[in-house]
Amino acid sequence: MRAEEIAGYDRAHVWHPYAPMPAGVPPYVVESATGVRLRLADGRELVDGMSSWWSAIHGYRHPVLDAAVTDQLGRMSHVMFGGLTHEPAVTLARTLVALTPPGLEHVFLCDSGSVSVEVAIKMALQYQRGRGRPDKRRLATWRGGYHGDTFHPMSVCDPEGGMHHLWTGVLPRQIFAPAPPDGFDAPLDDAYVATLTDAVARHADELAAVIVEPVVQGAGGMRFHNPGYLRVLREVTAAHDVLLIFDEIATGFGRTGALFAADHAGVTPDVMCLGKALTGGYLTLAAALCTPEVARGISAQGVLAHGPTFMGNPLACAVANASIGLLGAATTPAAASGPGADRDAAAGGWAAAVDRIEAGLRAGLAPLAGAPGVVDVRVLGAIGVVQLDREVDMAAATAAAVAEGVWLRPFRDLIYTMPPYVAADEDVARITRAIGAAALAA
């Protein structure tokens, strides 16, 4: 099909995410992608400043990832996971147990981030029932969060400023504490600590779990907070028999400057959700990990009644193993010999890349601080954010970035980037110039 035919049929029949039908802003037609560049049908090339919604951390057409998919395709593309198992899934589970915070020893593989949050919530509810506490069936979180687009995850997204406020009155009513104070390096706010602790303690009799995005709140506002608040949550939830769930779908695998955002705080949640970068952006795959205590509580009541058709898909697991290997995390049995084993082995390739990108983002975005219309500029790991004093004009901001040779996807009052870890210094510099152009145009 010619580019015009693709665009025409797309407009008439294809429903895009977070868009009306037809889409208000026509999408750009991508012909191919290599490295960190998207090639449009009209021949233009754009540096991908979004890592395809934060997932393509190694860029596109990486030879190691291509080979992993091709090799696995020659063995089997899929087999049901009910009653069967296979090496790619077992290797992946073994690796995740070794790399995630100590104590997360059981891995439930599913097929999207939102589903992993659904599974985590189901785990929490069933755990409390298995412990003889069926009244503990509500969830708590803080405002400003985003956890996915299916129903229970929507219920713990911000109920007012979030994109799911339309469903108020339909979703379960959860408990919301104020959003954590801004600033990764800001000191702990004692008043906020007291508020957070009180919110959990007052509702402990009805709470199954607290769920938060650790350190970085993603699609809810790209806000960073002091990791110490995670330690506060760990202490208060443990004191009141409430489970703690960390949604690391966006933050996992090095994005914040630590392999997992939980590592900034040095705590282990009861359940952790992973997704997005898990397969390097090649195939959809997610995971919910839990502690033995959670697994025992659930199993005391029977089975965890959840089974996605493509659970443990061999293709996805194979490329996930290869992607984690590219980060510098060994996937051999020796490196994954036990919970928490050889976590330092994962600090090789990704850490230097993220540090380099962070330095480039800080240097390139610094001139925007204090510019007209700019409220804040913030950088953490391979995340750069420019917040405006107004809603972004999506079409104008996107066109301005494309004119600079960069793909960005602003939202609300934010123009931000999460580049692939393989982005060169000149690519990062181009991304920051495009953010400046987009901010001016928006």
Image (cartoon, rainbow, N blue to C red):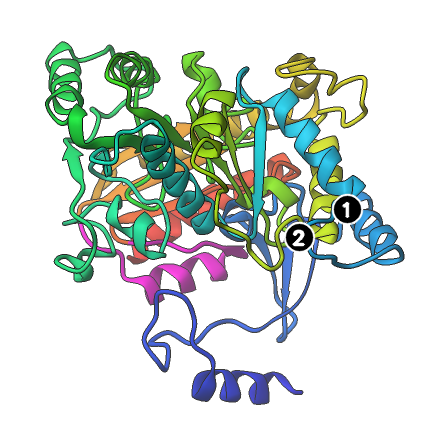
Q: How crowded is mark 1: few (under 14 residues within 10 Å), some or many (20 or more)?
A: many
In the picture, residue 209 is in which quadrant? top left
Give the secondary structure at mark 1: helix
Rendering coords of residue 67 (x, y %): 85, 49
Closer-to-camera residue (31/171): 171
**Residue 130 vs residue 417: left or right?**
left
User: Residue under circle 2?
Assistant: 282
Residue 406 located within the stretch drawn in magenta:
yes
Q: Which residue is drawn at 52% across and 88% down?
A: 9
Q: Residue at x 51, y 45 (%)?
A: 54
User: Residue under circle 1?
Assistant: 65
Q: How far apart are marks 2 and 1 (CA)?
A: 8 Å
Rendering coords of residue 406 (x, y %): 52, 54
Amino acid at circle 1: Leu
Amino acid at circle 2: Tyr
Above or below, comparing residue 434 to residue 309 in the picture: above
Magenta part of the chain: 390-411
Rendering coords of residue 204 (x, y %): 18, 24
Q: Considering only order in the chain, which callout, 1 or 2, is on the residue closer to the N terminus?
A: 1
